[in-house]
Amino acid sequence: MKHLKIKIDKLEFSWESILKDINFTLNKNDKISIVWPNGSWKTTLMKILTWEITKYDWFVENVWNLSLGYLRQIYSDDENKLVKEELRNAFKKEIKMEEEIKKIEGKMQNNSENDLIEKYTSLLEQFNNIWWYDIDNKIHQVSSGMNILELLDKKLSEVSWWERTKIALAKILLKNPDILFLDEPTNFIDISSVEWLESYLQNKWSGWYVIISHDREFLDKTCDKTYELQPKRSLTFYHTNYSHYVLERDKVEKKKMEVWKREEEYLAKQKQLVNRFRAGSRAGWAKSREKMLEKRDVIDKPFIPKKPNFRFRYAGFTPEKVLNLKELFIWRVEPLFYIREAILYKWQRVWIVWENGVWKSTLLKTIIWKVNVLDGLLAKWKSVEITYYSQMHEELLRNKTVRENFVHFGFDFTKEQLIWILSNYLFDKEYIDKKVKDLSWGQTSKLLFAILGQKESNLLILDEPTNHLDYDTREALESELKKYEWAILFISHDRYFVNKLSTHMWFIRDWELSISYGNYDDYRFKLEHNLDMDMNLYDEEAQLNLTLEEKIWERMAKKMKRKFRNK
């Protein structure tokens, strides 16, 4: 059976153990997710599997010469190349074959030797067998699914960073390798593209794949095996999807903790006896028992990841109406979409439903006055204080230290105060003098939350707040945001996060913003049942009753009413 065998006894950077006792085999048709807490060097493992890292002692057995496709977290290439040319480069083998055929055709005009004809015939047969003439159709199919058709004739220099992520993903799918390695494939792509990718992997992808992702719902739908990577520990294997892995892990870790505690109690008692009889008539027995204990296998304490303690400070009195947007044009160089009227109330947690390309971040930056209004009313009550979290952390000074960034935001704490604040976000004290550029993406996200948590606010505006955060950190953030008593306006393609947090939706359709209630599941339900989601022209409670009682069966209507009754 075809397989890829991986063995890493120990990997060290600067005398620090990074990975150890990694030993597993990828078999045909495996669909594996690798989960981890931040700091477990999962991207390093991915680079070893795909030969990106070669200078350390490890072993990858690829006797079948399987082709490997690797999607990196950040993508870049020749800036002047057209997107369609970049995608056609996924077919380098076919392009090289076509060039060889043309060379032979040129030679055959002056030379008709049998060897040349046989080589030409063989190449032409291979060329036709690989469906070269279907390549443009394949590019169109994948580009359509990833919503990048309109980018094909643009230069790479003309596309945004999130569009490059889509291009990189489309290219890797077109390469059609035997094994696909995807490192955070759902970061920076919209929900419709995530859903398309799920369907593509489930129904059309015939190869194997290994996925690293924080998107819990994506993992549930695409992977049936879960490998857990813990810091400086060997892999733990679970033959189930992510949700069942979480339940199973709790049982396994509980048993491991019980075994470890029994072992610690046994060793403590034995050491007491050894110390008690070290001198006297039973000294020989004590020495023998001590040697026996030294030879005993050491049981590592089970790894229990710590969760950060997110905090958001409230800014006193908040009016019922936080924001009022009326007859407003959102724009950059030209108008992008129109808002007839939208009011944000203090208890609402509003999810902005978007597809990449509708400039949803421009809406947020307009609300915080980083982008000027083209026309219309944008009113913020004077007692409203905004805390804004940016997806790319552009507020941070990457060449400055952690301490210097706190000062830049106006928080000149003592060293002891800063150590205590950072400890809530799982930073050790030595991080105070580290530059932001030397932090991981997950650490940078937590640093920005740590700084913003010192500001007083009654309106949180969050642009993709869960990107780069590990599973436990996401759940800690979700829990704290649910406690936030004032208004939240957020963008996210983390469907699990949206379902937990959202009470209302603002969605952009046909170049206009509309309003509805609910979360991601409600959104999908309305789409699948062709229900009208726009509440702009209706009283909220009346529209809710009309929709639920007339268009949804009675039991579901009662359940939904109870859910929103207190709102």
Image (cartoon, rainbow, N blue to C red):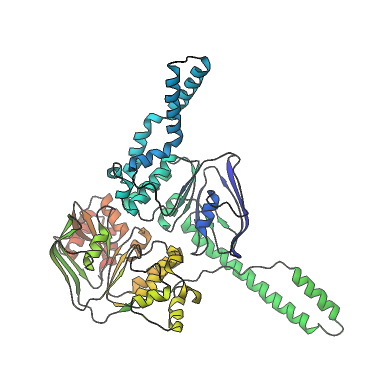
Q: Is residue 479 visible?
A: no
Q: Residue at x 41, y 57 (%)?
A: 215
Q: Residue at x 72, y 79 (%)?
A: 269
Say which of 448 and 294 sits in front: 448
Say which of 338 and 276 sits in front: 338
Q: Left or right of 430: which side holds 196?
A: left
Image x and y of residue 143, in percent: 33, 42
Image x and y of residue 449, in percent: 37, 71
Image x and y of residue 473, in percent: 44, 67
| Residue 87 location, quadrant | top left
**Location of residue 399 with respect to 179 vertically, above or below:** below
Q: Left or right of 480: which side holds 334?
A: left
Quadrant position of the C terminus in the picture? bottom left
Say which of 560 and 227 sits in front: 227
Total label count? 0
**Location of residue 406 with respect to 116 vertically, above or below:** below
| Residue 129 location, quadrant | top left
Quadrant position of the N terminus in the picture? top right
**Location of residue 230 with respect to 420 vertically, above or below:** above
**Location of residue 96 with respect to 302 vertically, above or below:** above
The outermost residue toward the front is 110
